[in-house]
Image: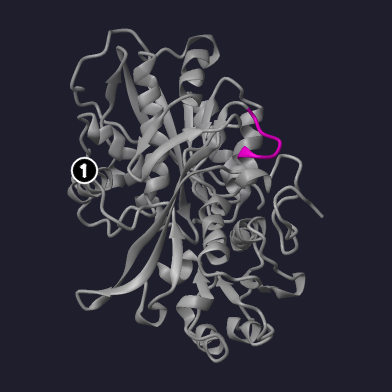
Amino acid sequence: MRRRSGPLLASIVALVPLVGCSASPAQPAAGLEPIRIGVVTVCEGDLSEDRNFSLAGAELPFIRRGAHLNVADTPTGGVTSVPVGGRDVELVEACERYGDRSTTISALSSLVERSGVAIVVGPSVADDSIAVREYARAHPDVTFIATGSEQSPTLRRTVPNLYRFDVDEYQWIAPLGRYARRTLGWESAATVGEANTPGYQVAGFVAGFCSAGGQIARTDRLFMDQAGSIDPASLVSRIPASVDGLFLAVSGSGMAERVWRQTHAPLSRHLVAGWQLLYPPDRAALGIVGSSSDPFRETRAWSRYNTLLDRTFPDLGDSGYLNQSSYDAVEPVLEALEHVDGDLSDGQRRFADTLAHLRYHAPQGLITLDRRHQAIGPVYLGRVVMRDGRPTMKQIAVFRHVHQTLGGYFSPSSPAPSQTQPACHPLGRSS
């Protein structure tokens, strides 16, 4: 899960070619313009350190096809082009500043209107996907691949030229709610999250838990303020002891868990956690279960992906989590281009149809798209255990083919997740 003024200076949004002039593995036909894929990264402000991760993920699909880095081990140096259907495919970067939506629009404009890209990827900041959706609405002949985790861009007011090959933050969390109800046997639950869009991931837990017949009182949905001035432990202390379990979606000093343990021991039976508490896991979380769109158990595809990542970027320091959304955008794009031999004629019609029906075998498992072009994919549950003297995650369950609507709990007409939405009700009944 990733997050993200006046007149813009030219230095705020930089358009950076990421391809060199080296010969491709197979020479494209002369005279054909290259196909350009643009990627928007956070280059200034908070989260600017994520730029390397985003670029690494976007470049790996090129590396898989025989391209090489212009500067060894460094994603910011760019990558050479690859041929597809007799045309070179290039990667171009544009930068935004975290928290400044005007720079998001400027980056998109730089790629589409100045560099002439045919496909745009990113940015990974959750809220920025809304801006991408609205920009895509005005440019129907360009394909946009969202990498932010916010739900609305592919559920509400959707546009046909926007796609996403990663599950959103609510799909990621919903199986944890079902696990708490069906496996742990909770009849009632409370949630603690943050009062912002990423913090509303608790809505996924609400959907999974309440759709299975669980109950969450509105007074038991508690939120920290955006300034972080509220201690999560103080929120946990307000939850009635009669509540069976807690979904804790915020990290802290461990006090919240200690407060909850006083009345709800053992924690392994009465607490499940959001990704903030489990990446990486620590001893205080032993026995606690969390969820992820990545497998906790090694698979052949997951191993190949991480081996390529480590070999290409040995100093990146990322196990796949931060770069993967970019990889899961560029890789299916290149696969679809290969299927249509690089044909983007007629408003990209063949390419768009191929992308919409692609069976994408991602490192984490099979991804297909629903009719609004949102990923249907797997979600994994893992428990914190000790292995070789250190805490790690042990996979305990897999939920395959998780849909964005979560069986009907969310829809294009349902209210966007918030501190009060969705309402807690079984499937088949709304309130």
Q: Is residue 132 left or right of residue 88?
A: right
Residue that badge 1 annotates: 71
Q: Can the viewer see residue 34? A: no
Looking at the image, which is closer to me, 350 or 113?
A: 350
Q: Residue 201 placed where, x, y %? A: 59, 59
Measured from the top left, where is residue 416 in percent x and y? 72, 51
Residue 155 rendering spot, x and y as whole percentages: 65, 39
Which amino acid type is marked by label 1? Answer: Val
400 and 65: which one is in front? 400
Question: What residue range appears in magenta?
Answer: 154-159
Count of all numbered marks drawn on residues in the image: 1
Residue 428 falls left or right of residue 125: right
| Quadrant assignment, res 305 | top left
Q: Residue at x 71, y 55 (%)?
A: 426
Residue situated furthest right in the rendering: 431
- The residue depicted at 43 percent of the width and 73 percent of the height is 288
- Which quadrant would residue 391 be assigned to in this image? bottom left
